[in-house]
Amino acid sequence: MGALWIAHVDVTDDQKYAEYIKVASVVIPEHGGTFIARGGKFVQFEGRERGRNVVARFPSVEAAENAYNDPRYQEAVKIAKEASEREIMVIETTD
């Protein structure tokens, strides 16, 4: 089954976060991820609003986990944590 990688982010340092984006833009597609929403317009109905939201479709939960655990991505996570507050999750789709 497919999976969605969902990130809700408040960027606190745009310049530093751009370094994270460079790596994520390479690693996520290498593991089969396709960005379907990336920082676009949104409407928050409930819960905590974050300024940036990203959704990537993966062929499986395992593929998304492999992307997250990729050593290059983990190095980028260190940068992201210094430059943002965020939540990331992966959820299996029904297809």
Image: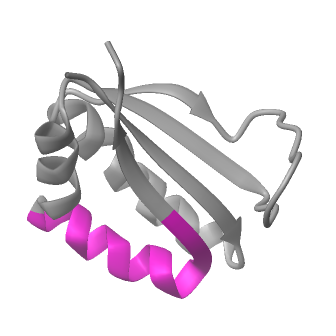
Say which of 11 and 60 sits in front: 60
Q: Main secondary structure of the magenta part?
A: helix
Relative vertical location of residue 25 with respect to residue 17 in this rendering, above or below? above
- Relative image position of residue 93 (x, y in whole percent): 36, 26
Q: Residue at x 24, y 74 (%)?
A: 75
> Which residues make up the magenta segment?
71-87
Say which of 51 and 4 sits in front: 4
Say which of 36 and 72 sits in front: 36
Q: Is residue 23 magenta?
A: no
Asked if residue 5 lies left or right of residue 42, the reply is: left
Say which of 34 and 95 sits in front: 95
Work out which quarter of the rendered image holds the N terminus and state it: top left
- Relative image position of residue 57 (x, y in whole percent): 37, 27
Colour scheme in the image? one colour
- Relative image position of residue 87 (x, y in whole percent): 53, 67
Query: How many labels sit on residues?
Result: 0
Q: Is residue 75 magenta?
A: yes
Q: Residue at x 48, y 82 (%)?
A: 81
- Relative image position of residue 16 (x, y in whole percent): 55, 74
Work out which quarter of the rendered image holds the C terminus and state it: top left
Asked if residue 20 lies left or right of residue 65, the reply is: right
